[in-house]
Image (cartoon, rainbow, N blue to C red):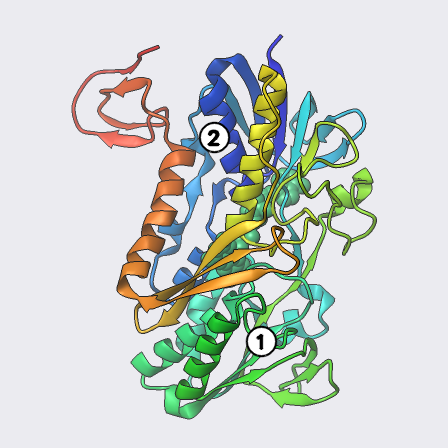
Amino acid sequence: MRTRVVVLGAGFGGLELTTILSHAFREEIDIVLIDKGDAFVFGFSKLEVMFGRQVAAEARHHYRDIFKPGVRFLQTTVRSFGPATKNVVADAGAFEADFLVVALGADLDPAATPGLVEGGNEFYTVPGAFALRDVLEQFERGPAIIGVTGKSFKCPPAPSETALLLHDYLVIRGRREATEITVVMPFGAPIPPSPDTSQAILAAFAELGIRFVKDSLVTALDPKRKVAMLSDGTELPYELFLGVPVHRVPAVVVASGLAADAFGWVPVNKQTLETRFPGVYPVGDVNGVGTPKAGIFAEGAARVVAASIIAQIRGGPAPEPYRGVGMCYIEFGSDQVARVDVEFLAGPKPTGTYQEPSEALKIEKALFGSSRVKRWFRTITRFVCMSRGYDPRCGVNFSFGGDCVRMN
Ligand SMILES: Cc1cc2nc3c(=O)[nH]c(=O)nc-3n(C[C@H](O)[C@H](O)[C@H](O)COP(=O)(O)OP(=O)(O)OC[C@H]3O[C@@H](n4cnc5c(N)ncnc54)[C@H](O)[C@@H]3O)c2cc1C
């Protein structure tokens, strides 16, 4: 019987893991990849769409375009799963696994912050970020706050990037003079593991007149008075509020017993990323290994877990332990991108290395995204597609006649 792998969540972590296993085993493995959505959107594309630099349709990578040997993608919602039995119940049916990968990300809860839904905006969900494109077009004057509402949140550079991109956006529209921009963050610096990166961001803020409020959370908005309440008891007026909503462990993961509560990210063996249940691995934002919540770390975790599954199936040696290594591109405005490389688990404390903003890094970031799309969504190596028009098995348009021919 083929080894059965069920992957819950087709985000950064789930897609990477599925791709590696499919490439390793082709039809000799049975992978069920489940997601409630119909398309993947990179986190950074949310900023691109909200600032009008990319259209929403281009940012969506449809799961119907996944064609991978050994992989079945199902668009359905996971309702429950048992880590001890490795059984999954979804709307589309029940599934049994030999290896269960939980890559369900973090749930976002704007309603947890009083006043945010009624009187503010958030840019962390796909609908929230995409809707902001129109909101920003209408924004003319007054204070703008980019405010974090919970201590643990995805992509720690994103609020700072948003402030720098908002500055550019308002300059282009001739509205910057009429606005003030403030960033409220729960850290003492924008990127704590890399003092150089933090310093560069703070220098850019100082130069562009962006205020940085450190060690604070936005706890509530009062839409009537148009003020944001901060955890230190102060209030800030706002005309435009761009929030990072509270992040929670997905309810289905808490119900499974893998997490103790909505803020207890799933505990794992830090070297293998396995839970206390053999063959059950949380990958990405949902795990509590101690790295930031970012796609690049989800990808790194997926690689270690995939290597471990491959070693167990083939009987090879265990892979190298997880080191919590990752990097992040940082939008600096003025069409420049910086980069920070961080290592979380190798030494006594996290370390980071900073690369100055440049156009070369902007190109590197674009290649980073396009290479993932190519790898995750199109395996056309074993097919020669000669059909006229769109063929979903190849995921590309062909303008000459014929059929999609399988080569192996
Ligand atoms: C504004 C912004 C900018 C960012 N920029 C970057 C960046 O530059 N670099 C970077 O590395 N990271 C960035 N990130 C973070 C990155 O997007 C996430 O950390 C990453 O996507 C996490 O991967 P994941 O696989 O853990 O979860 P996700 O990619 O969130 O995937 C989880 C999947 O699970 C599915 N799901 C959830 N519950 C269910 C259910 N019950 N049933 C079925 N399916 C379900 C969801 O639909 C989703 O597709 C950014 C995030 C934001 C918000």
Crowd rating for badge 2 (residues with CA inside 10 Å; few <14, some 14–19, many 20+):
many
Q: Nearer the viewer, mark 2 or mark 1?
A: 1
Q: State if disc 1 and disc 2 touch (CB < 8 Å).
A: no
Q: Is residue 361 left or right of residue 60?
A: left
Residue found at the very far bottom of the displayed protein? 177
Badge 2 element: helix
Label disc, if present, on residue 19 of the rendered structure = 2
The mark nearer the N terminus, 2 or 1, is 2
x and y percent of residue 322 in the render? Answer: 60, 42
The residue lying at 42 percent from left, 85 percent from top is: 140
x and y percent of residue 206 in the render? Answer: 45, 87
To which residue does mark 1 refer? 189
Q: Nearer the viewer, residue 54 or 325?
A: 325
The residue lying at 43 percent from left, 69 percent from top is: 134
Q: Is residue 37 left or right of residue 405?
A: right
Quarter placement of the N terminus: top right
The answer to whether residue 80 is seen in the rendering is yes
- C-alpha separation, residue under disc 2 versus residue under disc 1: 36 Å
The residue lying at 56 percent from left, 57 percent from top is: 125
The residue lying at 46 percent from left, 17 percent from top is: 26
Residue found at the very far left of the displayed protein? 400
Crowd rating for badge 1 (residues with CA inside 10 Å; few <14, some 14–19, many 20+):
some
x and y percent of residue 47 in the render? Answer: 44, 63
Q: Is residue 266 placed above or below 375 in the rendered structure?
A: below
The answer to whether residue 14 is seen in the rendering is no
Label disc, if present, on residue 40 of the rendered structure = none
Q: Is residue 32 placed above or below 158 in the rendered structure?
A: above
Badge 1 element: loop
Q: Nearer the viewer, residue 265 or 347?
A: 347
Q: Is residue 247 placed above or below 370 in the rendered structure?
A: below
Q: Nearer the viewer, residue 95 or 314?
A: 314
Q: Identify which amino acid the numbered label 2 is placed on.
A: Thr
